[in-house]
Amino acid sequence: MKKTISIIAATAALMTALAVFVCTDVKFDNPLDADGTNYLGDYMSGLKGSDKDRCFKPDANGNPTFWSDTTCLPSCDGVNPGIKIVGKASVTTTTKPGDEASANDLKKWLHLDAGNWKDIVDFDSGKGGTQQPYPPTVSLTKDGGGPIDLKTLVITKDTIRLEPNTYTITYKVVKDTCIGKIPSAVATRTLIVNKYVPPVGDITITVKTPNPVQIYEGTPYQDLGADVYIGTTLTASALDSVVVRDSRNNVVSRVVKPNDDFSKVKLSDNPKAGETFTVTYYASNGGKFKTAERKVEVKADQTTLPAVIVLNNYTYKLNGKDVKWPDTMLYIGSANYVEKGAKAYKNTGSGIGDEITGPNVVTITPPAFGGNDNITKQVDYRVEAGNGYGAASKKRNVHMVEKECDVKTAPTVNVSVSEITAGTPWDYDKSWSVINKDENGGGAAFKYFIDFNGLDPDKPVAKTGGYKVTFVGLGKCGGITEKETTITVK
């Protein structure tokens, strides 16, 4: 690695001519010594021609500039940089779920939150240990075990993936801009992770999933129930009561001491589509009380839900791997469009059900591919209502690309989102745009395809380090641009 240091900000204090030349004790803070002598000028005049050409080169304005390769760096001064712990040298946390403060402290101590170093360690600038250009590195070691990979460590308010144990956090700072024995220094902090044990007598109610629950109009409701823990012990028949209320907070039904028989929990008679209910579970122990809730949503009769059409994909090669995507491109005037087809499924209200089989279930209507329009055309797919499903339609994009172009400049891809919410479907089509740059002028080009790289846009799940998602844009003359963006799920 090479870097330039301006002569105006540098002076030479001493030069020793050896067979292998080393620039020693070069001062970069003052170009003159105490009596006004230009040390840098003296330093340059004493160099041999080959060394002068190697260590000094003109900058953009023609001024000589100190150009250091590793043999032109100053010799190490032998003084270790200074570093010391800020705050407690021994810290404690627990694996208690929901303890956001402890999770944030742990991320701070390990410098995983991009916070300021001054809140973790202090630098003794008198020993050269300033934060720049010597930022520390952080490592974590389990006592009696090996190092922990911080890149894969999961720390959230609900999850701390560290076993209960004692650990050592090591902060190391190195003065790596010199030749010789490179000075370094370390400071350590003890981390104690304790297993969370709820106090004896504390009550926890765990509502059995899924929550919320969706039922269809005319379908009987079967409550899934809840588990009660006293301390860490699962306690059968511990619920005092279960109460169901409608959206107006009116009590619909009440079951006292259900004794784990949740068939007694009822909604109102004949609940209608659009109605919502709240099921509240009550428990107590030794004067302590706890409640938990489940939401119940009533949907329209399942037979009226539209079918789900799934388009068969095309396969694209991206950086040596296959990427599946439903849209494609076609050169203007070409008759080589290849139809991949589609399948239809029943709609369960919360996902895809059984496949709808039979002749001509999905009707496919392609557009007219003739003409010279440099646009996106669409293939229509249609399913008519049948037994247990409603009518549905879907479209496939076919981007019409000009083949004979003098200028095939690749388009510009812009991505406007870097963070999405866990569990919430991501409307990714609104998160990026493609601008044309070839001879057809500016304006929008084509959104070709996306490599989600393991991210499910319908049900995003948090992942340490995020997901490397690649957006591929297609110019109107066929130019291709790939843009990789890290998408964080929170």
Image (tube, rainbow, N blue to C red):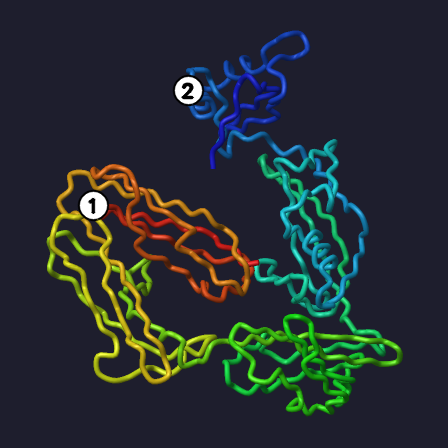
Q: Is residue 39 above or below residue 376?
A: above
Front in this rendered view, residue 344 or 475: 344
Front in this rendered view, residue 309 or 254: 254
Question: What residue do we see at 13% from left, 44% from top?
Answer: 404
Is disc 2 placed on a helix, strand or loop?
loop
Check the picture and name the quadrant holding the C terminus.
bottom right
Q: Earlier in the sequence, mark 1 or mark 2?
A: 2
Question: Is the C-beta separation of discs 1 and 2 under 8 Å?
Answer: no
Q: Is residue 41 above or below residue 291?
A: above
- Residue 26: image x %, image y %? 59, 24
Front in this rendered view, residue 316 or 272: 272
Structural crowding at the residue carrying mark 1, measured as other residues with C-alpha within 10 Å and reported as few (<14), some (14–19) or many (≥20) = many
- Residue type at mark 1: give it: Cys
Q: Which residue is mark 2?
A: 60
Q: What separation in Å lies between label 1 and label 2 (alpha carbons)?
A: 39 Å
Q: Which residue is mark 1?
A: 477
Specify the quadrant of the image occupied by residue 227. bottom right
Specify the quadrant of the image occupied by residue 198. bottom right
Image-based side of 428 in relation to 89, left or right: left
